[in-house]
Every structure is written in structure tokens, then in C-alpha cells.
């Protein structure tokens, strides 16, 4: 828990300037992504991304990356505070019981919203710090630990296509009763399996490609290209779906991520085999 005194010190500390600026930078994106949503729904994606960046940038700084991530989330929670205050203004014209209840509820909403934003920033910073540690050429890693990750990557390359076919089959009704409970369950299971496997495969890809970079088999440009394509596809599909007023931009973006990851994995495995073999 961050006290008001600690928060004041962090906001005025020169070491925390980057975290504060990152939090401020999330505000327009949070407003943009939340504008057309339910009035009580605020997107936490910008704060998560900012937390990742802050955790990465604060890897070798004096200020602890976790504290910086929380600070980013707290600053980025400004839209929650502003919208809550706007929703509270009508209570100024109510009688004392309604005013008191409305004020208490507003304070609770602000406290919960800021707390969640700080938690999201913290989680992002933890992940970003772990990425920076992994990319550090002096970081610790064992050959036994690194050797197994490519197998998870290869498993995704083999398993993802049948799951995608099963998912498309449930959408189109090919070979199944499209309105049956079994088809609905099968489609949901296929979608969930694709998503979970994609997360595991992306992490395994990160572990393997960073291990190869340390061994000199993969250069830094290769690393950023391999790891940047799937998230880039997610962002592009999300923006395109948003501009097309899609009913579910996030869902469309997930499928874009899954497809781009599979293409990246296939190309990466071919590159890996040519450079270091299958071991």
C-alpha cells in the first residue's frame, strides 16, 4: 500500500520522472479506448503497456521497478478519478442522506479504481523487469533450462492448425450441428485452447530466442523482429476492428495475434534449425 507521503515523494523524485511521464502518456489512450465502452468500464491496457515499459527501463535504475510500475498506474488512473467526480456532481443537489451515500460510493470507486490501476502497473513492471533481466547479456541462465523451450514452440506449430480448423468448423457449421450444445462447447474449448497455447508458445519463444542470442546464434535485430510481430499484429487488428466498429475488437485482435504467432513460429523454427539444429 502506498501512503500519501510516499506518493508525494515519488511524484517529486527525479528518479521517478520517467514513471510519472509514462503514466501521463497513458491517459489519452485510456480515454480513447474507454470512450465508447460501458460508463463503468475503463480500459487497463494502456497502463499495462506502460508498466511493461517502465519495468524494462527501470531494470538498472536506483528506483525499484515495482515502485515505478505502481506509480505509473496511479498517475494513469486520472481518468477514473475525473469520471467518478463527474458522476458525483449530481449528488450536490440531493438531500443529505443521498449526498452522503453518493459521496461514500464515489470515494470507494476512486479507491478501487486507483488500486486496480496501481496493481496493473505493478504487474506490467514485474514482467517488464523480467524481460530486461532475461535480455541482459550478463543474466544467469542454464543450458538445461534453455534447451527445452523450443519444444513448446514446435508443439504450438503442430497443434494450432487443427484447433483453428475446429474453431472455424463451429463458426460455419461444417460437419457439426452449428446450433447444438456440443458445437458451442467445442468452439469455446477450441478458442480457449488456442489462446492458452498461444500465451505459452509466446513465452517459450521469448525464452528460446533470448537464449540463442546469448549463445550468439541470433542477433538483436532478429530478436526484436521475432518477438515484435505477434504483438504488432494484435495492435493492428485491434485498431482496424475499432475503426470498423467491430462488436469485439479485443477478440478480433486475439485471433490476429494467434495467426501472426503461428506464422512467426514456423519461420523461426526454420531459422533455428538452419543455425543451431534441432537440439
Image: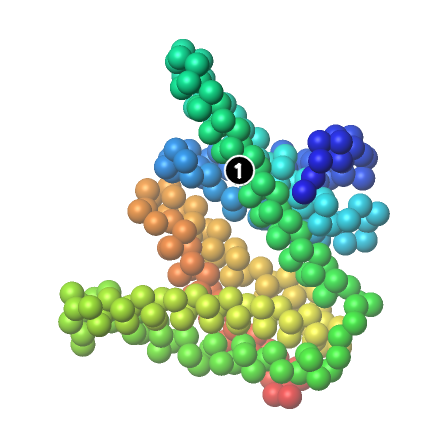
Instruction: Tell me which residue sits at (71%, 84%) in the image.
Output: 144
Q: Nearer the viewer, residue 1 or 253?
A: 1
- Judge whether residue 275 can be spotted in this image: yes
**CA neighbours of label 1 inside 10 A, class few (<14), some (14 to 19), many (20+):** many
Q: How many marks?
A: 1
Residue 116 appears left or right of 125 = left
Q: Is residue 60 left or right of residue 158?
A: right
Residue 119 image point, x, y percent: 60, 47
Residue 142 to residue 2: above or below? below
Could you tell me which quadrant the C terminus lies in? bottom right
- Where residue 47 sits: x, y (%)? 58, 43
**Residue 189, percent from left and from top:** 34, 70
Image height of 122 relative to 97, above or below: below
Which residue, given by chain and number where applicable, does mark 1 sit on? 113
Left or right: residue 235 versus residue 71 is left
Q: Residue at x 31, y 66 (%)?
A: 188
Q: Observer-nearest residue: 234 or 101?
A: 101
Q: Position of residue 236 (x, y in %)?
A: 46, 51
Residue 226's place in the image compared with 52, above or below, is: below
Q: Secondary structure at mark 1?
A: helix
Amino acid at each position: 500500500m502506498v501512503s500519501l507521503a510516499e506518493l508525494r515523494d515519488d511524484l517529486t523524485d527525479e528518479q521517478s520522472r520517467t514513471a510519472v511521464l509514462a503514466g501521463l502518456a497513458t491517459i489519452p489512450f485510456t480515454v480513447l479506448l474507454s470512450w465508447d465502452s460501458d460508463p463503468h468500464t475503463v480500459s487497463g491496457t494502456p497502463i499495462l503497456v506502460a508498466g511493461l515499459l517502465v519495468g524494462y527501463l527501470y531494470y538498472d535504475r536506483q528506483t525499484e521497478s515495482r515502485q515505478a510500475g505502481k506509480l505509473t498506474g496511479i498517475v494513469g488512473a486520472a481518468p477514473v478519478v475525473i469520471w467518478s467526480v463527474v458522476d458525483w456532481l449530481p449528488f450536490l443537489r440531493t438531500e443529505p442522506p443521498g449526498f452522503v451515500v453518493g459521496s461514500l460510493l464515489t470515494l470507494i470507486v476512486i479507491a478501487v479504481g486507483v488500486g486496480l490501476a496501481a496493481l496493473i502497473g505493478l504487474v506490467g513492471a514485474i514482467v517488464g523487469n523480467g524481460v530486461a533481466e532475461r535480455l541482459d547479456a550478463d543474466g544467469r541462465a542454464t543450458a538445461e533450462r534453455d534447451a527445452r523451450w523450443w519444444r513448446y514452440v514446435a508443439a504450438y506449430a503442430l497443434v494450432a492448425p487443427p484447433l483453428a480448423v475446429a474453431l472455424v468448423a463451429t463458426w460455419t457449421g461444417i460437419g457439426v450441428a452449428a446450433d447444438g450444445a456440443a458445437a458451442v462447447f467445442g468452439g469455446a474449448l477450441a478458442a480457449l485452447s488456442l489462446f492458452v497455447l498461444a500465451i505459452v508458445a509466446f513465452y517459450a519463444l521469448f525464452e528460446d530466442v533470448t537464449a540463442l542470442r546469448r549463445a550468439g546464434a541470433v542477433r538483436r535485430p532478429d530478436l526484436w523482429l521475432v518477438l515484435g510481430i505477434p504483438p504488432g499484429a494484435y495492435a493492428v487488428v485491434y485498431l482496424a476492428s475499432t475503426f470498423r466498429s467491430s462488436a469485439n475488437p479485443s477478440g478480433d485482435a486475439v485471433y490476429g495475434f494467434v495467426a501472426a504467432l503461428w506464422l512467426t513460429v514456423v519461420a523461426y523454427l526454420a531459422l533455428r534449425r538452419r543455425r543451431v539444429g534441432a537440439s
